[in-house]
Amino acid sequence: MKKLFPSLLAAAAIASLATFAVAPAHAQGDKPKDKVTLMLNWYLYSEHAPFFLGKEKGFYAEEGIDLDIQEGRGSAVTAQAVAAKSATFGYIDVTTMIKAAAKGAPLKSTGVLFQVSPMSVMGFTEKNIKAPKDIVGKTVAVTPGDSMSQMWPLFLKVNNIKPEQVKIVSGDAQTKLNAVTNGQADLLLGYVMDQAIKLQDATGKPVTPIRFADSGVNQISSGIITNKNLLTENPDLVKRFMRASTKAAEAAEKSPEAAVDAMLKANPKAGVRDTLIVGMKQSVALYHTKDTANQRPFRVAMKNVNDSLDLLVQYGGMDASTRGKPEDYVTLDFLPN
């Protein structure tokens, strides 16, 4: 035993030195990732797919981010969660955030993905309602008080349609879908990549949306928001998150199918693949205006934000005294070039 003891000591010393030598490099490779929660605006549907694609492709992991994607229950609820710091980032209707921020909520958008409004009036293609003039004499299902119903009078006005030339039936989101499905209404107000897809899924019939934006009634829509404090407390994290999210949106632009597949892999109950792909393609069509056609996703034109502020004051219930400037609500400082 005495003869073996020095040998054991030597072996232990060599092992200890080897461990010490590789430990620093190993520790750097295992640097813990920042745990980040992204809360969405609603239950999963097409427009959310890019974030799942980015996570699957490792874009967030490459930026040192351990991303948790959570479903939401409305833009206002997600805005409250981000304001309370129970979610790191939110993906919501940015105009909803603006109204909350104007009242003092510590929120700011770090990029606008939907720069063309998804607001539409839509019905079954078989009804041959393709243009605003075709709406005259028809019945439209609306949800009183929602953002689309607030923009509806302006849409009618710019298309020279008098309110009395259209019959209105009211109800919640599901009631609107039911009204069109069972023939009580010809059309409904909805989002091109949401209600249009749900109608098609439920009936198997193609749907034709008439977008408000094509008549010049355009508001910025979905984008990333965060708590203002994070912008100064951890600006590097915000930059890394927006860099990964930009890459994710670009990858979804190139392959909507891959984005949908990534979301369905994470949550098989997210929807029907074929119609989700249609919705994803319609979502991608909302990423850029003419002003940002050559820009990367999320880099909105501030003129677009300014016009949206004007619409919020005129039709969205925003107090003109709290309007502020576009830069009060949206920053492009954390986006990649």
Image (spheres, grey):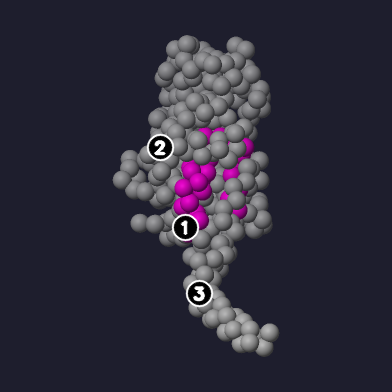
**Label drawn at residue 255:** 2
Please tell me which residue is depicted at 51% across the width and 18% down the height of the picture.
123
Q: Earlier along the polypeptide chain: callout 3 or callout 1?
A: 3
**Label drawn at residue 22:** 3
Residue lying at the far left in this picture: please name it: 294
Where is residue 334 drawn, in percent x and y? 44, 59
Q: Earlier along the polypeptide chain: callout 2 or callout 1?
A: 1
Under mark 3, the amino acid is Val
**Label 2 with label 1: CB-CB less than 8 Å:** no
Nearest the eye: 2 or 190: 2
Q: Which residues are magenta?
A: 37-63
Real-space CA distance between mark 3 and mark 1, rounded to the nearest whole angstrom: 22 Å
Q: Is residue 20 visible?
A: no
Where is residue 228 drawn, in percent x and y? 56, 61
Under mark 1, the amino acid is Glu
Q: Answer above or below: position of 257 versus 17.
A: above
**Label 3 with label 1: CB-CB less than 8 Å:** no
Q: Is residue 60 visible?
A: yes
Q: Which of the image's four quarters has the N terminus?
A: bottom right
Q: Residues within 10 Å of mark 3 (few under 14, many from 20)?
A: few
Q: Answer above or below: position of 253 versus 329.
A: above
Instruction: Name the residue beneath numbered marker 1.
Output: 62
Where is residue 151 drawn, in percent x and y? 52, 33
